[in-house]
Amino acid sequence: MNKHIEKLYNSAKKPSRLVIGLMSGTSLDGLDVALCKIAGQGSDTKVELLEFTTVDYTQNYKSKIKSVFAKRQVDLQQVTLLHPWVGVLHGQMVNQCLANWGVQAAEIDAIASHGQTIYHCPLRQHGLTEFGNATLQIGDADHLAVTTGITTLGDFRQKHIAAGGEGAPLAVYGDYLFFTSKQENRILLNMGGIANLTYLPKTADSSAVFSSDTGPGNTIMDAFVQQHFAPLQYDKDSAIARQGTVNSGLLSALLEHDFFALNFPKTTGPEVFNLDYLAAAQQRSCTHDLALEDVLATLNVFSATTIANALNNAAAELGEFSVYASGGGIHNPLLMEHILNLCPRVSEVRDTSELGIHPDAKEAVLFAILANECLVGGQQAFGNIEQGIPNVTMGKISFAD
C-alpha cells in the first residue's frame, strides 16, 4: 500500500482529525486559514475551531489576480503561471500560520484548499448550449501539498459541476452537516463578494434543504471604493455610504438584471456584477454625474435589496426561521441595517458565532468539513439535484511527494 494512502486510511480510523481549511474569496482581502478538529462524519460531524487567522494579501498579489479575475479575455501565460504560484504562496502562508501556532505539519491530517476563483461561468450565464456549467479556480493543490508537506484536497467545485450542479454554492453541504437544528428552521446567510443563503429545516430532511446565490454582496461596493477612494479597500464602518443619498433611478436600473427573476437555485459572480455593470446602469438611468458618496449609498441599498428580496421570498414559502450571517458583509453596519428594514418578518440577524463558528472563519471551516467527508464520510446520502445539490464526494487528493 502506498504510504500516503495508508496514512489516510489510518487518519480515517482516528476518533478525530486535524484539518486546515483555506478560503480565498472574490474580495481578495486575504487567505482565511482555519485549524479545525473534526470528529465523526455525516450528520454526526463535530467541529472545534482551534485557530483562525486571515493572512492579508499584498498589493502585488491583488494586482496579479485582478489581471485575470472575472475577465473573458486574459493573458493565458499569466493564468498558467499564476496557477502554481498561488499554490506555493498559499502553502507558505500555511507554514507561517503553523509556526505562529506552534503546530507541526506532521500533526495535520489534511489541508482543504478552495483555491482562488478567477472565473465562474454557469450555462445560464454564458448561454452556449454546446457547453455546460463551468468554473475555474487557480492555486494548484500539488504545489500546496509539496510546499507544506501535508496531503491537500482541492478543486472541490469540479465534481459538483460534473454531477449536474453549477459549482456553487458549496456551503450548503457543510451548513447542513454542522448547523442543522431540530429546534428551529435556519437560514445561513453568507455575504462575501457574492451573497448566498442556505435553508436548513428543523426536520433535518436533506431533500428540503436548498442553497442559492442571491446576487452581489460586497463585490461592487469594494471595487468602487478601491477605484475612487484608494488606498481604502472597502467602506469601513459604512462611513462613506452614510454620507450619500440613495438615487432611486440608479437603484431601479441596478435591479433590472434577469438574474433576480430566476428561481432558486442560481449562481452568479463578479463576472456579471462589477463596475462595468454599474457603468451600464448609470448610463441607462442618466446618473453619471452623481456624487461618489451617492453612488456608494445606492450600491449599499442595491446589495441589501437583493438579499432582502431573497429572504422575503423564503419567508413567504417557508414560514418562521432564524437568520445567522457570516462573511465580510456583517462588518458593513449600513448594509445590515438596510436588510433588517427591508425584511419585516426578520426581527434579528445574528452571526454564526452564536452557533460555535466565528463568522469570518465559516467558509474555511466548511471546506475543512468537505475534506473530512471526502476522507471518512460518504455513508450518508445527501442532496437533491432538483435543488442544485448533487449527492457527491468532492475534493481531489494531492500527496506531498
Image (tube, helix red, strand yellow):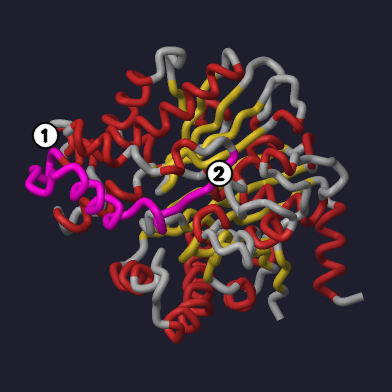
Question: Does dot 2 land on a helix, a strand or a loop?
Answer: loop
| Residue closest to the eye, 397 or 134 | 134
Residue 153 part of the magenta-drawn span: no
Label 1 environment density (alpha carbons within 10 Å; few <14, some 14–19, many ≥20): few
Q: Provide residue 5's location: percent of width, then percent of height.
A: 84, 70
Task: Please state which amino acid type lies under the numbered disc 2.
Answer: Lys
Relative to residue 381, is residue 84 drawn left or right?
Answer: left
Looking at marks 1 and 2 on the same chain, the residue that comes earlier in the sequence is marked by 1
Give the residue at x 61% y 62%: 129
**Vertical order, 63 against 326 (above or below):** below
Residue 293 part of the magenta-drawn span: yes
Q: Which residue is mark 1?
A: 243
What label does residue 173 carry, if any? none
Q: Provide residue 179's location: percent of width, then percent of height.
A: 64, 31
Relative to residue 176, is residue 303 drawn left or right?
Answer: left
Work out which quarter of the rendered image holds the C terminus and state it: bottom right
What label does residue 266 carry, if any? 2
Q: Provide residue 325's location: percent of width, then percent of height.
A: 47, 32
**Vertical order, 318 against 284 (above or below):** above
Magenta stretch in the rendered image: 265-294
Work out which quarter of the rendered image holds the N terminus and state it: bottom right
Relative to residue 118, is residue 200 drawn left or right?
Answer: right
Label 2 environment density (alpha carbons within 10 Å; few <14, some 14–19, many ≥20): many
Give the residue at x 59% y 24%: 186
| Residue closest to the eye, 241 or 267 | 267
Q: CA distance from mark 1 to mark 2?
A: 34 Å
The answer to whether any part of residue 359 appears in the image is no
Q: Provide residue 128's location: percent of width, then percent of height.
A: 56, 64
Give the residue at x 82% y 48%: 377
Q: How many marks?
A: 2
Relative to residue 214, is residue 317 drawn left or right?
Answer: right
Give the residue at x 75% y 25%: 204
